[in-house]
Image (cartoon, grey):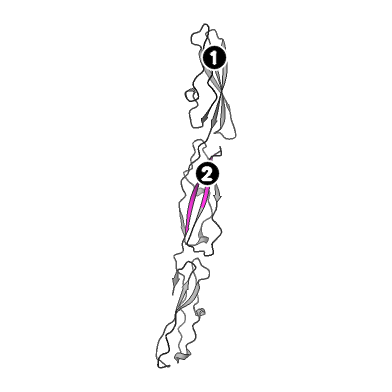
């Protein structure tokens, strides 16, 4: 008869399921056979997730006459280890609108101790566009990696937005007058062709105006006005 049946036990899916790791072997005594033959057979009870299942292990002791007795050991196999993945590469762009769409394929090096194909999903996306398309601003995307047992981990992708390109504009037309007093007032509208890589509406301001009138109103004299064009990120040109 079997005198000791290994107790029920829980093991992790990556560990050995052999008796040495699951509580040892059954033992038995017999009135005639000094060392009954001990054998076992396994019945696997599967679940939706291949990493979690039950082994019904039947131990059998048989004497020399073929008499036998048996007992059942229940082995629960579980996965409690989270998957792992590499941190996605940082993205650097000049305009918030240039940030590429979320893509689970940026998550690489996905591995798990038992699940050969953990699932990657987008957990949190970037926030709504800021008031200035060119930043500077740093935002993040968080991706979640989940194995079939529900164990999960996250990786964060950093996205830096920093516009470093100054706007451009056409040079205002030269003004020719006969009298200094006839020089028209400064007007930012003389600055045309204003464009920027990120900001749709850079601001034009007067940086330096013409100096005070000279002693002779008729010159000859050449003076300049300087206009400044600035985008919302603070990049400027004149």
| Element carrying mark 2 | strand
Look at 51% across and 13% down and name the residue there.
37
Which region shows up in magenta? 141-161
Residues at circles 1 and 2 in contact by the CB criterion of under 8 Å: no
Q: Quadrant of residue 208?
A: bottom left
- Say if 94 sits above or below 221 in the image: above
**Residue 2 vs residue 231, the one in the foreground:** 2
Q: Distance of mark 1 from mark 2, alpha carbons?
A: 46 Å
Q: Is residue 64 above or below residue 166?
A: above
Horizontal and vertical percent position of residue 228: 46, 75
Residue 117 x, y percent position in the rendering: 52, 40
Nearest to the observer: residue 213 or residue 57: 213
Label 1: which secondary element? strand
* Number of the front mark, 1 or 2: 1
Residue 63, label in figure: none
**Screen quadrant of the C terminus:** bottom left
Q: Is residue 159 magenta?
A: yes
Residue corresponding to mark 2:
145
Q: Which of the two labelled residues, at mark 1 and mark 2, occupies the earlier sequence position?
A: 1
- Residue neighbourhood size for the residue with mark 1, other residues' Cα within 10 Å, grouped as few (<14), some (14–19), many (≥20): some
| Quarter holding residue 41 | top right
Residue that mark 1 sits on = 2
Residue 119 sits inside the magenta stretch? no
């Amino acid at each position: 008869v079997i005198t000791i049946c290994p107790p029920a036990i829980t093991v992790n899916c990556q560990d050995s399921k052999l008796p040495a790791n699951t509580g040892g072997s059954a033992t038995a005594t017999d009135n005639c056979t000094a060392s009954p033959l001990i054998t076992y057979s396994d019945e696997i009870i599967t679940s939706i997730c291949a990493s979690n299942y039950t082994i019904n292990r039947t131990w059998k002791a048989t004497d020399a006459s073929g008499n036998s007795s048996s007992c059942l050991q229940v082995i629960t196999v579980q996965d409690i280890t989270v998957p792992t993945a590499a941190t996605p590469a940082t993205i650097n762009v000049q305009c918030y609108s240039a940030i590429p769409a979320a893509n689970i394929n940026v998550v690489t090096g996905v591995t798990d101790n038992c699940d050969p194909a953990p699932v990657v999903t987008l957990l949190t996306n970037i926030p709504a566009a800021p008031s200035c398309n060119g930043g500077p601003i740093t935002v993040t995307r968080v991706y979640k990696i989940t194995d079939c047992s529900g164990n999960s981990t996250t990786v964060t992708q950093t996205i830096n937005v920093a516009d470093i390109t100054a706007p451009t504009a056409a040079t205002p037309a030269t003004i020719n007058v006969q009298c200094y007093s006839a020089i028209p007032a400064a007007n930012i509208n003389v600055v045309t062709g204003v464009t920027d890589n990120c900001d749709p509406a850079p601001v034009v301001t007067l940086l330096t105006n013409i100096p005070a009138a000279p002693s002779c109103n008729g010159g000859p004299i050449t003076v300049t006005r300087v206009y400044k064009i600035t985008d919302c990120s603070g990049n400027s040109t004149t």
